[in-house]
Amino acid sequence: MSNQNQLAIMKKNVVDVVENKVREFQKAGEIHFPANYSPDNAMKSAWLILQETKDRNKRPVLESCTRDSIANALLDMVVQGLNPAKKQGYFIAYGNTLVFQRSYFGTMAVTKRVTGAKEINANVIYEGDEVDYEMVNGKITNLKHKQKFGNINKDKIIGAYCTIVLDSSNVYHELMTIDEIRQAWSKSQMWGKGQTEERKGSTHDEFRQEMAKKTVINRACKRFINSSDDGSLVIQHFNRQDDAIVEAEAQQEIEENANKETLDFEEENIEDAEFTEVESEPEPQQQTEKAEPEPQQQDMFANEGPAF
């Protein structure tokens, strides 16, 4: 069977199933997409990207990953209203499991969609900057930051913060020290055991400011979105995706340690904020907060034939 025929069969068995599932959600009133979002266009973009995406062993993910994981990755993407063509997320293989991992642009997009936030901004704090704020009922309020141009130095970052603005009277702040930021980075598989600072020449070192802002934005959005009372399908998939990543990473590490292989992810093609933003390996880190319940993948193929 030719490669084109195999792709056509796979598309029918996976993409069409996901599209039908999304239509069911829409018909039941469980999901409503923004006026400027087309699920069909997002799926077409994703399918084109998937055909070119390879795992760490340079094998096409459409061959090496399970059908269920491919379908769930696509479903997570669509339900959250994201499009990989807009750099709002990436398809990443962990062993034979494919996951859709939001970029921080995607995390901001979902946060704005769910909460109605008007702005999401972040900045870095350097030695010598003046930072003042109040704590009211455990929340940071009235955050003020004065910075002198001469203080800007990536080697003198002491923290970062993110501000989510709903309206003039409702503002949420997330503040992280550089130690907390590095702790988040240490969760990445590209951060060596016992490593306490950025490796010289690494992405975390070269683009430290942007990586710090990315980290605090992700934490702020996740905490803020999960503090809402919205139990919508969007939030369920927002959190299911993160749980799936944690599970897939753990499973991959178990399998590779069992084979006595050393994890050795190449630090390339990593999302670098405003820089070239392409990602084929795990982000360097978006901190993934581990949720208590085991992630549950939807079995959309219970009545289907064997996986290809």
Image (spheres, rainbow, N blue to C red):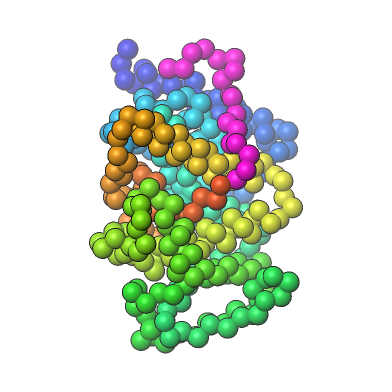
- The span picked out in magenta is 291-308
Q: Is residue 86 left or right of residue 114?
A: left
Q: Is residue 81 visible?
A: no
89 to 178, vertically: above or below: above
Where's the C terminus, which quadrant?
top left
Up-down: is 80 above or below 130?
A: above
Residue 125 image offset from top left, x and y in percent: 46, 77
As displayed, is residue 59 above or below residue 12? below
Quarter of the image containing the N terminus? top left
Tell me which secondary structure the magenta stretch mostly adopts: loop
Q: Is residue 264 above or below residue 132?
A: above
The residue at the point 33 percent across, 62 percent down is 198
Q: How many marks?
A: 0
Q: Is residue 294 magenta?
A: yes
- The structure residue drawn at horizontal position 74% and vertical position 52%, both measured from the top left corner, is 229
223 lies left or right of 60 = right
Task: Tell whether position 205 is magenta.
Answer: no
**Which image quadrant for residue 144?**
bottom right
Q: Quadrant of residue 30?
A: top right
Image point 73% across, 71% down: which residue? 137
In the image, residue 39 lies at what x, y percent? 55, 39
Choose top left, top right, bottom left or bottom right for residue 48. Answer: top left
> In the rendering, at what x and y percent does residue 300 appear?
58, 24
User: Nearest the camera: 84 or 36?
Assistant: 84
